[in-house]
Amino acid sequence: VARPATPTEPVALDRALLQKDATAVAPRLLGKVLVVGDRVARIVEVEAYRGAEDPASHAYRGRTPRNASMFGPPGTLYVYFTYGMHWCANVVSGPEGLARAVLLRAAAPVAGLEEMRAARPRARRDLDLLNGPAKLCQALGVTGEDNGCDLLDPASRVRLADDGTPPPRRAARGRRIGISAAADRPWRYWVSGDPHVSVAPRR
DNA sequence: CTTTGGATCGTCT
DNA sequence: GACGATCCAAAGG
C-alpha cells in the first residue's frame, strides 16, 4: 500500500502527466488524491477507455451530447449518469480530442470521513465508502453538475492533486469490470493488495 | 460465502 | 423500446 515518502500538502497535478493515452495515464493516477471541499480520497483503482479504438467506450460511436466532455482537453472531468440512479466519474487524458478517459473505480478515504459517511449511509464499514465507481461519486458528492470541469483548476469544486505519494512501482492489471464489449482488454489497474479496491481481480 | 433480481431513467437506435 | 463503465438486499448453499 502506497504511503507518501514525504507527505506534503496536495498540489494540483502537472497537466503533462495526463497528456499520454489513457492506458499510460491510468496506472500513474494510482496514489493521486481527489479533493472536494474537506473530503479527500486516494485513488486505488481505475480503468482506461479509448474512444473510437474501444468498443466499450461511451465515445466508440463518436460524439454525442452525453459524452461531449470526453472530447475536451486532458484534465477535464467526464461525469455520466447510469442505471437510472448512479453517477460515475472519469479523468479525460490525451491525446486531446480523441475521447480517451480514465474511469475512477475506487479510492481510500483520507480526510472528511464524517461527510463521506453521511453521504453514504448504506456503507457499514469505511472500506465500503468509495469501493466502486458510483460509491466514489456518492461519497464525494460528485454529480452531473461537475461534468466538464477542469480538475487542475484551483477554482474547480472537484480537483485532482498530488500529495507526494508515488504510484505503485508495478500496478496490478486485469480485465475491466461490468462491460460486455472488448471485455478481454486488460485495461483495469489497481494498487495490488489494497483493501479499498472494488472487487476481487478477474484474471 | 455466492447468486439473483429489483430499483430507476437518460440516452441513443 | 432496450439497455446500461452499478449497488444493494434478500435468498440460497
Image (cartoon, coloured by chain):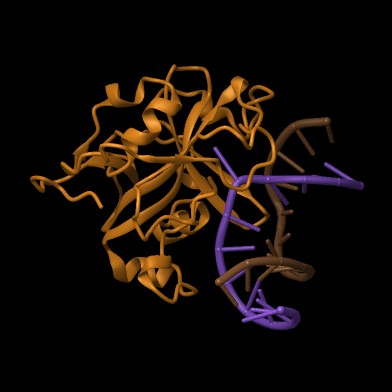
Chain colours: A orange, B brown, C purple
Q: Is residue C5 left or right of residue A114?
A: right
Residue A50 vertical placement versus A38 (above, below): above
Is residue A108 shown left or right of residue B4? left
Residue drawn at point x = 60 percent, y = 20 percent: A53
Q: Position of residue C2 (x, y in %)?
A: 86, 46
Q: Is residue A164 above or below residue C13?
A: above
Considering only vertical position in the picture, is C6 above or below A116?
above
User: Total marks drawn?
Assistant: 0
Res. A75 in view: no
Q: Is residue A119 above or below residue A142?
A: below
Residue at the image point whose x is 47% and y is 24% from the top = A72
Q: Is residue A32 visible?
A: yes
Q: Nearer the viewer, residue A181 or B9?
A: A181
Residue A17 or residue B7, whichever sits in front? A17
Residue A109: percent from left, percent from top: 31, 60
Residue A27: give x, y in percent of width and height. Answer: 36, 35
Name the residue nearer the viewer: A114 or A148. Answer: A114
What residue appears at the point 66 percent right and 22 percent down from the top-left corner?
Answer: A62
Q: Position of residue A38 (x, y in %)?
A: 26, 58
Specify whether A22 is left or right of A166. right
Describe residue C3's horizontal placement relative to residue A184 as left or right. right
State the image quarter where residue A112 is shown: bottom left
Foreground residue among A192 and A32: A192
Residue under the image location 59 percent in, 32 percent down:
A67
Quarter location, residue A108: bottom left
